[in-house]
Amino acid sequence: MVQRVSVYGEPAADGSNVVLVAHALTGSSRVADWWGGIVGPGALLDPARDAIVGVNAIGSCYGSTGPASASPNGGPYGSSFPLVTVGDIVRGQAAALAVLGITRIRTAIGGSLGGMQALAWAIERPEDLDLAIVIGAYDHFAAMGIALNAVAREAIRSDPNFAGGDYYGGAAPLRGIELARKIAMLTYKSDALFSERFARHVDRNGGDPYVNAADRFDVEGYLDHQGANFSKRMDANAYLTLTRAMDLFDLRARPLSPAAPQVAFVGISSDWLFPPRYVRDAAARLAREGVRSRYFELHSDHGHDAFLAEPAALTEVLAPILGAAGSAAAAVPS
């Protein structure tokens, strides 16, 4: 098994400055590339002070072993790639850290699928860290999220080029992955944001849907743009693998250790993919069971994507949790 790892900063021997940043569905180990407002010189997670580590998830397509990787038979795994769970991803991260000589970390943090990983670290490896920060995620994945993932996967599998998942060496199912991305973008944003940004404007690149049915509204052009860009960088099978890992995530029946670290849950006010009420409920459940668990809320119209789109606002919430300099954020009682 191969895992791609990125390290920013110098890890302390005891892991006391190590922050594991777990990426979301389409992220990579290169956390400074996609979370630049949070990770980087002078940012909340600063390599001059912190050792920030990113590990590309097993099943992804950005350097770690995934469906496009060579199997023991020589060709790509394709449809034979095994089922992956969030627990598998976390165990892979721990193994990668051990190779680096890191056996304990200060903090595990992530949003969305990354938040699931951070919580799995707290519950499955409680003695290996001090703090888990779970952003836009909770202790399971609800039926609506599973349903939305299922529709996106169906879009991919319906592409004639999908070939049952064994399309390597031929035409990729680009149309399918583009449509899956469009579906996902609707879940990542909010009605308020779309109303403000697009309203009923016609496509900024030209055309008039009031005159020609084939022309687009501006929001349609946005979705087309997102889909086209995404199909250039995402492997369809990796998308299937990681969305199913999200579906399978459910830690509610897992026993909690007396040694469980602190857990900070951050809900996003306009998030309908991971509704903040579910995030709050998860924080409350852990608190009732003796975990030092608190709930915070990021107020934003950006929807689920707010943890990526609003780094300054997120820093305001995270700074006091991390004990860094910054404005105080009031915790909502669990």
Image: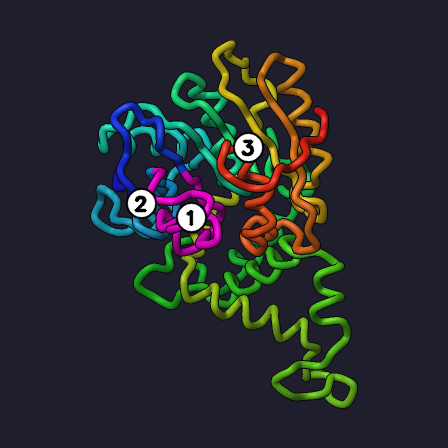
Residue 122 placement (x, y as % from top left): 48, 24
Identify the amino acid type marked 1.
Val
Instruction: Give the residue at mark 3.
Output: 321
Residue 258 to residue 28: above or below: above
Label drawn at residue 8: 2
Q: Residue 316 appears in which quarter of the rendering? A: top right
| Mark 2 residue element | strand
Label 3–label 1 contact, CB within 8 A? no
What are the residue bounds of the magenta stretch?
A: 21-50
Q: Specify whether residue 70 is in view.
A: yes
Side (left or right) of 216 relative to 81? right
Q: Earlier in the sequence, mark 2 or mark 1?
A: 2
Identify the amino acid type marked 3.
Ile
Identify the amino acid type marked 2.
Tyr
Q: Earlier in the sequence, mark 2 or mark 3?
A: 2
Residue 6 placement (x, y as % from top left): 30, 45
Q: Residue 277 appears in which quarter of the rendering? A: top right
Which residue shows up at 54% across the image and 67% down it? 226
Which residue shows up at 55% across the image and 72% down it? 225
Q: Earlier in the sequence, mark 3 or mark 1?
A: 1
Instruction: Give the residue at mark 1.
Output: 39
Per the picture, the main secondary structure of the magenta-coloured stretch is loop
Q: Specify whether residue 241 is in view.
A: no
